[in-house]
Amino acid sequence: MLQLPDILDARDRVRETSRHTPLEYSHTYSSMTGADVRLKLENVQRTGSFKIRGATNRIATLSADEKEAGVVTASAGNHAQGVALAATRAGVDSKIVMPEHAPISKVKATRNYGAEVVLEGTDYSQAADRAHGLEREENRTYLHAFDDPDVMAGQGTIGLEILEDEPGVDTIVVPIGGGGLISGVATAVKERNPDARVIGVQAAGASSAAPSLDKGERVSLDGVDTIADGIATRSLGEGTFPIIRERVDEVVTVSDPEVAVAIIYLLERSKTVVEGAGAVSLAALLFEKFDYEADETIVPILSGGNVDLNTLTNVIVRGLVETGRYLKIRTVLKDQPGALESLLAILTAHRANIYAIHHDRTSRDVEMNDTEVEIELEMRGSDHVEQFLEDLRDEGYDVDVLA
Ligand SMILES: Cc1ncc(COP(=O)(O)O)c(C=O)c1O
């Protein structure tokens, strides 16, 4: 099983390609939670996530012949970019297989880091089949995204950095996909400072760790569904599961709306761009998914910042809905002059700002002499929304909240 010396060895190798990322005290989250919150900013790591660490360490351990033959992997995400840059820096040829529908931004970034991108299949498993084909045909080494001790050791260097920068850390909160990141971090932390807690976080729509730990064996989900695409993994690895069982204190889950709120807070308050997978750790803290003492030093690892702009737009809207800053309602008015004006008077009284309004007298959902109105509003928070809806209903409007 992975041990601390593996991670100490990795540290020297990983220094060549990756940054010792900042550990930043957050006044905002400390005052919100009563804890002493320090954010580990792996979103500003080279390639935008921690993956460069594991890939660098794995490539450094290849023999001269293996380096000559090159590496291959399948990934549409952060692992692709990490492997591409790590290989290029080591002078090793890399091929990355991505599903055909992979976002063009990820394809371009991976190419820019020096990899040859092969587009194949409609999903990850077809891409992985092709990558294993290339492994055999071209004698390349397949770089697994998490289930490889050298990869885990590379990711574990984050744990060493946290302990170095904040030796008194009480709790480290770590996203879990396949479990490579948390296996490395937990190994470093538990051997150096056994009193520190390591808490794993999964998205509720991709949560295989908790049932696996309950059952005592790896559970594989039939499907996954979450905005945190970096951790949308069906199961833990064969190698990561026993490490998680032995060294991780607790595993919790967060919902997509909770992740969206964490992303919004990070953008608005911390001026920090973090992808869904990178925000689950802060979401778990903000939504009190685990217990902690006042003044406890808590480090959520913000593991990546590679979020595509369309996804970010959706997440922002979801986050605004969750925090009561965006409201979409539908109601029915009499189709007569002044009906809309009376409704708008209530909006004005509440200072609810209109983004968009749709007035439809042809809707089949309403009576002939009625008209349907859908309004999108900018609001000031959940209390504002509640008060506004209460007044509308008191005035006799039948209101559906659409978002
Ligand atoms: C941003 C981000 N966070 C967390 C993870 C989870 O890492 P692991 O699969 O090693 O658990 C990933 C994996 O791709 C990731 O991209």
Image (tube, rainbow, N blue to C red):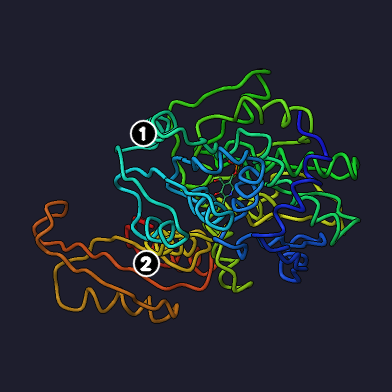
Indicate left or right for 302 with 388 as reference.
right
Residue 403 visible in rendering: yes
Query: Which of the pair 332/240 is nearer the observer?
Result: 240
**Which quadrant of the view contains residue 4?**
top right
How many angstroms separate mark 2 from mark 1 (CA)? 63 Å
- Work out whether 388 lies above or below 229: below
Mark 2 or 1, closer to the camera:
1
Q: Residue at x 39, y 51 (%)?
A: 116
Q: Residues within 10 Å of mark 2 (few under 14, many from 20)?
A: few
Give the position of the C terminus as an image quadrant: bottom left
| Amino acid on which disc 1 is placed | Arg
How far from the left and from the top, in percent, is residue 321? 46, 61
Indicate left or right for 384 with 289 as reference.
left
Instruction: Identify residue for label 2.
Output: 395
Q: Residue at x 34, y 45 (%)?
A: 118
How far from the left and from the top, in percent, is residue 206? 52, 36
**N-terminal of the two: label 2 or label 1?**
1
| Amino acid on which disc 2 is placed | Glu
**Which quadrant of the view contains residue 370?**
bottom left
State whether label 1 is within 8 Å of ligand 1: no
Instruction: Identify residue for label 1.
Output: 130
Give the position of the N terminus as an image quadrant: top right
Secondary structure at badge 2 equals loop
How far from the left and from the top, in percent, is residue 190? 85, 40
Query: Which of the pair 112/268 is nearer the observer?
Result: 112
Secondary structure at badge 1 equals helix
Q: Residue at x 59, y 63 (%)?
A: 46
Query: Which of the pair 271/191 is nearer the observer?
Result: 191
Q: Residue at x 33, y 75 (%)?
A: 355
